[in-house]
Amino acid sequence: MPKDSLFQYVLGMGDDALILGQRLSQWAYKGPFLEEDIALSNISLDMFGRANLLLEYAATLKGNGATADELAFKRNEREFKNYILCEQPNGNFADTMVRQFFLDAFYKLFLQNLTKSKDDQLSAIAQKSIKETTYHLRHSSKWIIRLGDGTAESHAKVQSAINNLWMFTNELFEMNDIDNEMVKQKMGVDCSILKIEWDQIIDDAFSEATLNRPEDANMPSGGRQGIHTEHLGHLLTDMQYLQRSYPDATW
């Protein structure tokens, strides 16, 4: 198996966590109330922690003295491999919770399977991360139900968020050549088989929250190939500002 395939596979997972962590960090001191402000900040820290583990491993695979910081702060938009859903703007609180719920449900299933990886490093990272993701899913699913089964306004906002973000969910279950190679080597996860169980998690929450599931139509993808929406470029401008302004600065 080419070493680059494993590098690209790990990099994609690391980018998911990094970009989602950056999005959630933007809620710091802006949460709807103190406890939720703290919760979102803690989930953001969990994502940054996962990103650091994965990007450090990716840097080791890349070699030539590469570091996790270089991967995070010195790549341009087209070099990032995160799912498009991760980069979508926070919007209102319902938008953030729907985005989080879709990704939490996916990553709980994904990480459960990744714990079985023949790659010891990936298995160890998955075993650590699954504990956090279980909490993340419990948190976001409760909010989906609370908002959907709440006031007319909260119901309308969460349904609007679902309608707007649904198009980005199909990408989570697509398999490319690298994914297939990782499955063949018993190192990765066949995401296509996760769809049925993911659908059940989503449908159960939507049913309790009296929310409607949109039809599958116009489902863009390409994040793993470096094809992104305009939102990622704006996010990277903020996230990479210090490194771009003062290259290799140290404290």
Image: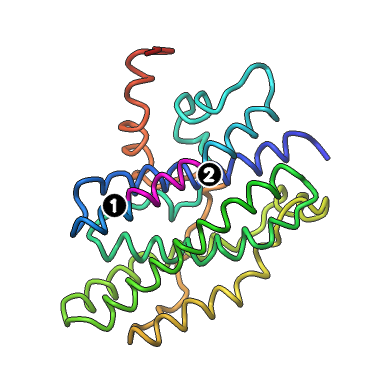
**Is 136 placed left or right of 123 in the picture?**
left
Dot 1: few (<14), some (14–19), or many (≥20) neighbours within 10 Å?
A: some
Under mark 2, the amino acid is Arg
Q: Is residue 79 left or right of residue 175?
A: left
Q: Is residue 87 found inside the magenta-colored segment of the image?
A: no
Q: Which residues are magenta?
A: 41-49
Query: Total marks drawn?
Result: 2
80 in relation to 138, above or below: above
Query: In front here: 118 or 70?
Result: 118
Q: Nearer the viewer, mark 1 or mark 2?
A: 1
Q: Which residue is mark 1?
A: 38
Query: Residue at position x 25%, y 61% from top?
Result: 93
Residue drawn at (58%, 58%) of the image: 130
- The label on residue 50 is 2
**Residue at image location 62% in from the left, 58% down from the top:** 111
User: Where, quadrant-wise, is the C terminus in this rendering?
Assistant: top left
Viewer-proximal residue among 80 and 96? 96
Image location (x, y in percent) of residue 96:
32, 59
Marks 1/2: CA–CA distance: 18 Å
Question: Residue 109 in the image: x percent, y percent?
Answer: 60, 65
Which amino acid type corresponds to the residue marked 1 in the rendered image? Answer: Ile
